[in-house]
Amino acid sequence: MSCGLHLKELGIPFQIFEKESRPGGLIRTEKSGEYQFDYGGHLLHFRGSDLEDSVKGLLGENNLVRFKRRSFIYSNKVLTPYPFQVNTFGLPAEVIRDCLLGFFDTKLKASRAKIDNFFEWILFHFGFGFAHHFFFPFNQKFWRIPLTELDTEWAEWSVPKPTLKDVIDGALGINVQDFGYNIYFYYPKQGGVEILAKSLAEKLGKIFLNREIISLNLNNRKFLLDNGEEIGYDKVISTMPLKELILKIKDAPEDLKKAGEGLRYISVLCVNLGIKGPMISPAHWIYFPEDQFNFYRAGFYSNFTEKASEHQSVVLEITYLPDQEPLKDKDYLKQSLEDFRKTGLLKDEHLVEYTGVMKIPYAYIIFDRHRKSALPGILKFLEENGVYSIGRYGRWTYSTIEDSIRDGRETAKKIAR
């Protein structure tokens, strides 16, 4: 939709076909009575004022609230602020000792070790203590594959790397600095995150809904829709998962098919809870690295507002590999509720009025060696054949809403040349 909006401004004709009954993909919000849930955590972060101004103009500046992040880690029955590596104060003394000694050891090493994977990257930057007490258990729980199979591209920009002073200050409880790319974020006052998709759609006009692309033919530049209609094209801009796009190309060469087969990802199941009662936590989200809880993160949608309410919308997020046999929804709900009670956050005075499950089949792509070697060639081949695969899942990368909007704009410019 971002690409379409910019093509419209450039006077270039286009049509948009959307598989679902509503435009916007995962930028979707569901309501049930007093409770509201997005498809996972979707927040607006801006690194550039140009896109920040554009989104504010699209939504109306008065419909965006700016928040300072309130996020925590729950481990050893203690809530510590995020990120863990600069906030160990309050944890058991032996945990702090292990983290400090391990971090000191990494700083005493004179030469840079060869880093081949994310497992080694963690040890090099943080030492065994931080690895043992947080990074290894959390990331193993999240990624569901050996950490030696992950590369470090995504971690270099997303995981804060503190100085020795930062770590010591965090252990003493005197750290006053904020870390990370998402210290501040925006969230709509009304309509949940889907208001962004709705606003874009209104600007675009006609979008063909419930229209899934069944197949794509590169040689004759035509694609087939699920209603039997065959349409010719000059260029295709696709935001479907890259792995799915390759499967739909009927005349794809064998090396492209093989490269697509090797792309890996993890799925997310969101257990949504509508809870009536006193505030559960002031947090926006909390990470749970320990195996005793089946979810890796709890998010509190009802805290993305300036007004307190006795109706609290909570999501518990669980990752799984697509080839795993997932539990039945009711089993996930039962186990997640039991585990949430074990945290002490959900108390007897809280009344669970709503439960539901959302599944995100493609949630996080896996950064491994195959992706690193195969992805440039895949995208290059597609562009040479008039297909621009863009966005988080189209480019098979980790990106924010801001990145996706920018990707659409830059692709429109590329097509206009």
Image (spheres, rainbow, N blue to C red):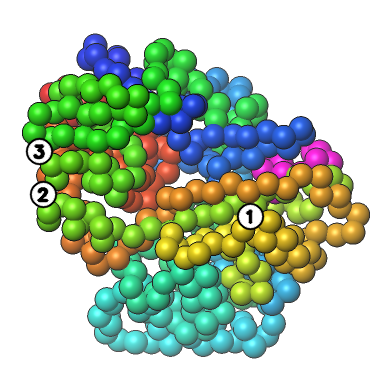
User: Residue placed at 23% from the left, 46% from the top?
Assistant: 246
Q: Image quadrant of residue 13?
A: top left
- In the figure, 6 relative to 67: above or below? above
Asked if one can make out residue 22 in the rendered structure from this viewpoint, the answer is yes
Helix, strand or loop at mark 1? helix
Q: Image quadrant of residue 38?
A: top right
Three-letter amino acid code at disc 3?
Answer: Glu
Three-letter amino acid code at disc 1?
Answer: Asp
Three-letter amino acid code at disc 2?
Answer: Pro
- In the figure, 174 relative to 67: above or below? below
User: Residue placed at 67% from the left, 61% from the top?
Assistant: 331
Magenta span includes 303: yes
- In the figure, 321 relative to 181: above or below? below
Q: Position of residue 355 (x, y in %)?
A: 73, 48
Gap between marks 1 and 3 measured at Cα: 43 Å
Quadrant containing the N terminus in the rendered view? top left
Q: Position of residue 282 (x, y in %)?
A: 74, 51
Using residue 373 as the reference point, say whether residue 281 is left or right of it.
right
Mark 3, mark 2: which one is toward the viewer?
Answer: 2
Per the image, the residue denoted by label 1 is 329
Gap between marks 3 and 2 measured at Cα: 14 Å
Helix, strand or loop at mark 2? loop
Q: Which residues are magenta?
A: 301-314
Using residue 178 as the reference point, say whether residue 336 is left or right of it.
right
Q: Position of residue 154 (x, y in %)?
A: 36, 59
User: Residue placed at 53% from the left, 75% from the top?
Assistant: 137
Per the image, the residue denoted by label 3 is 384
Q: Which label was assigned to residue 253?
A: 2
- Within 10 Å of disc 3 (Cα), the crowding (few <14, some 14-19, many 20+) is few
Pointers 2 and 1 in contact (C-beta within 8 Å): no
